[in-house]
Image (spheres, helix red, strand yellow):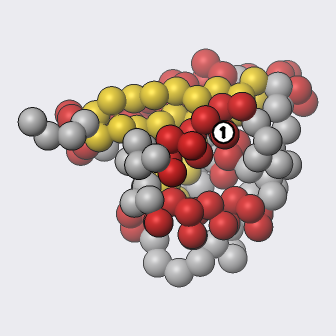
Amino acid sequence: MHKKYVIALYIRLSVEDFKTESLSIPNQKLILREKAMSLPEWDNGEVLEFVDNGHTGTNFERPAVQELLTMVQAGKIDCIIVKDLSRFGRNSIETGYFIERVFPLYHTRFISVSDDFDTANFKGDTGGIDVA
């Protein structure tokens, strides 16, 4: 039996974002599920959702992102999908550290839908990516 490909959908909504429908939790879930379903690995995939509702993106002290990172470090996540990089984190140094150092160490693919960013097709560093 083959190991299931585990796809993590990470969704974050800050208090300030509550008024913006495009950033709403249901809208983010829809966008991320559509992206997950477009992956070839979807056929053998399992999708997990991690939601931080009402948390700032300026640090990584958020319950769902901490749970996600713990699962990455345990080798239980194959792919993370976010709507855009700012949903994952607004601190470009920390966000870049996870994308460039942590996720490759654990063989975890990272996809940002709106930024058209996928570490499966990425070479180099995140120095030019705007996460603000």
Residue furthest to the front in view is 74
- Determine which quarter of the picture holds residue 33: top left
Q: Percent x, y for residue 45?
A: 28, 34
Left or right of 73: which side holds 40?
left
Mark 1, Cα crowd under 10 Å, few <14 / some 14-19 / many 20+, is: some
Against 35, residue 22 (above or below) is: above
Say which element carries label 1: helix
Q: Percent x, y for residue 43?
A: 20, 34
Count of residue discs: 1
In the picture, the quarter occupied by the N terminus is: top left
Against 51, residue 131 (above or below) is: below
Q: Mark 1 points at which residue?
A: 65
Which residue is depicted at the point 61% across and 35% down?
A: 67
In the picture, the quarter occupied by the C terminus is: bottom right
Q: Is residue 118 visible?
A: no
Which amino acid does the dot numbered 1 rest on? Val
Left or right of 3: which side holds 7?
right
